Amino acid sequence: MRVKIKLRPMRDDEFAAFFVQSKERFARDMVEDGGLDPEPAHIKAEHDYARLLPDGLASPGQFLFVVEDEVGAARGALWFADQERNGRRCAFLYDIHVDESSRGQGMGRLAVQLLEQEVSARGLTTIELNVLGGNTIARSLYRSLGYAETFVGMRKRLAATSPMAH
């Protein structure tokens, strides 16, 4: 059986919960997959979300959707912005989330494909996004859909040692 989903605009009564949960996921992902310490990750998440969504759903250039299944049940959320990056206009995907209980059914893949249709309908020809290095599932999904990595940051943590005495 093939799963069916649709994207529908997020409603005002859904935004507050999305805002809190998305911001917390972002901070957690920066810690777990990006190597940040918890406090700076939470500060960055607070700052970014306040800057990007100052007027909630009415924030200019921001588009928030609920991922719904065929019976109208919410199964996740998707947020992208129409913005200029590096001198060209594009869609920037800030968040895509499928509820834990709905994973492994192809909903994430379908949601990205619906995002591509939504972005094309708005006259945009490029989607950009960031995936933290440790998120191998997302990186694999995007690669399988034809997305190319454009930047890879790397880090190595060294064991703390006492300064060498000379």
Image: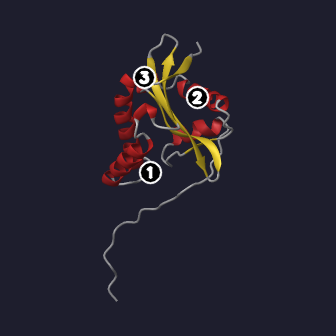
Q: Position of residue 5 (x, y in %)?
A: 55, 18
Where residue 99 sits, quadrant-wise, is top left
Q: Determine the residue positioned at 62% across, 53% down.
A: 86
- What type is the residue that disc 1 sits on? Gly
**Count of all numbered marks drawn on residues in the image:** 3
User: Could you tell me how far apart the alpha carbons at marks 1 and 3 are, in whole angstroms?
Assistant: 31 Å
Give the mark nearest the N terminus, 2 or 1.
1
| 152 vs 72, nearest the viewer | 72
Secondary structure found at label 2: helix
Q: Name the residue tied to disc 2.
A: 109
Q: Residues within 10 Å of mark 3 (few under 14, many from 20)?
A: few
- What type is the residue that disc 2 sits on? Arg
Q: Determine the residue positioned at 41% across, 53% down.
A: 35
Q: Position of residue 6 (x, y in %)?
A: 55, 19
Secondary structure found at label 1: loop
Q: Residues within 10 Å of mark 2 (few under 14, many from 20)?
A: some
Q: Residues within 10 Å of mark 1 (few under 14, many from 20)?
A: some
- What type is the residue that disc 3 sits on? Arg
Where residue 160 sits, quadrant-wise, is bottom left
Q: Determine the residue positioned at 39% across, 28% down.
A: 15
Q: Name the residue tied to disc 1.
A: 34
Q: Name the residue tied to disc 3.
A: 11
User: Could you tell me how far apart the alpha carbons at marks 2 and 1 are, in whole angstroms?
Assistant: 23 Å
Residue 42 lies left or right of residue 113; in this view the side is: left
